[in-house]
Image (cartoon, helix red, strand yellow):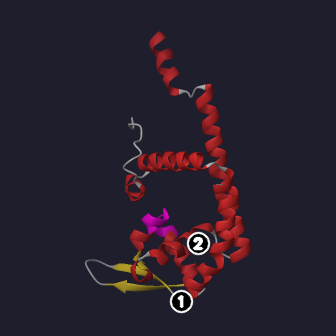
Amino acid sequence: MADDAAEQDGLWLSHEQLHEWKSLMAMLMTVPASLDAQLKQDAGLNLFEYHILVELSGAPERSRVLSELATQTRGSLSRLSHAVSRLEAAGWVERRSCGGAGRRTEAILTAAGWRKLQQAAPGHVREARRLVIDALTAGQLENLGEAARCIVAVVNPEVGATLADSEAPCAEAS
């Protein structure tokens, strides 16, 4: 019986850990919703669609294979395909088959999509600054980024590798 109780003690969060966990969950639920609302109101885009345009804008020739784009935007291929269809209908993205092994499709940012991103970005950056950047000291922002990279590396090592910072070690995952 004593062993069961000791085992259970390791399962539950301490009061301090629970406090930090609740704070993290509140941030994860409120920040993306606020960013999404701002983009919808000001630009007619949702946060995921905006990130698709951002990823394409930074890619060589403003194009990326859909499977790579799904990884970069942290979405499933199905979710990405639906979003790309909406962006395509608006004239901001085009799809085309690309050569190579297997059936591969890439998304290309159109000139209209580039203009849409340029129009949407200032409001989005203002909101990101208001909600996160300006709410923290430089040290807090650095610590937040470091913690986020460690968590992402555990959740999705492939995505974590794209964010890796060799100078900021993370705790060993158990």
Examine the structure image and report whether residue 77 is included in the region drawn in magenta.
Answer: yes
Q: Nearer the viewer, residue 24 or 168?
A: 168
Which residue occupies 65% across, 61% down? 128
Which residue occupies 65% across, 80% down? 119
Which residue occupies 58% across, 26% down? 14
Vertical side of 34 occupied by 94: above or below: below
Q: Furthest residue to the top?
A: 2
Examine the structure image and report whether residue 45 is included in the region drawn in magenta.
Answer: no
Q: Which residue is mark 2?
A: 50
Q: Which residue is mark 1?
A: 111
Distance from label 1 to label 2 (Cα)? Answer: 15 Å
Q: Secondary structure at mark 2?
A: helix
Q: Nearer the viewer, residue 38 or 12?
A: 38
Q: Is residue 153 left or right of residue 102?
A: right
Which residue occupies 61% across, 43% down? 24
At label 1, the amino acid type is Ala
Q: Furthest residue to the front?
A: 138
Region rendered in magenta: 70-79
At label 2, the amino acid type is Tyr
Q: Main secondary structure of the magenta part?
A: helix
Which label's residue is closer to the chain start, 1 or 2?
2
Total marks shown come to 2
Q: Secondary structure at mark 1?
A: helix
Vertical side of 131 occupied by 87: above or below: below
Q: Quadrant of residue 168?
A: top left
Query: Where's residue 162, x and y in %?
Result: 40, 59
Res. 1 in view: no
Query: Where's residue 21, x and y in %?
Result: 60, 38
Vertical side of 54 occupied by 170: above or below: above
Q: Quadrant of the C terminus?
A: top left
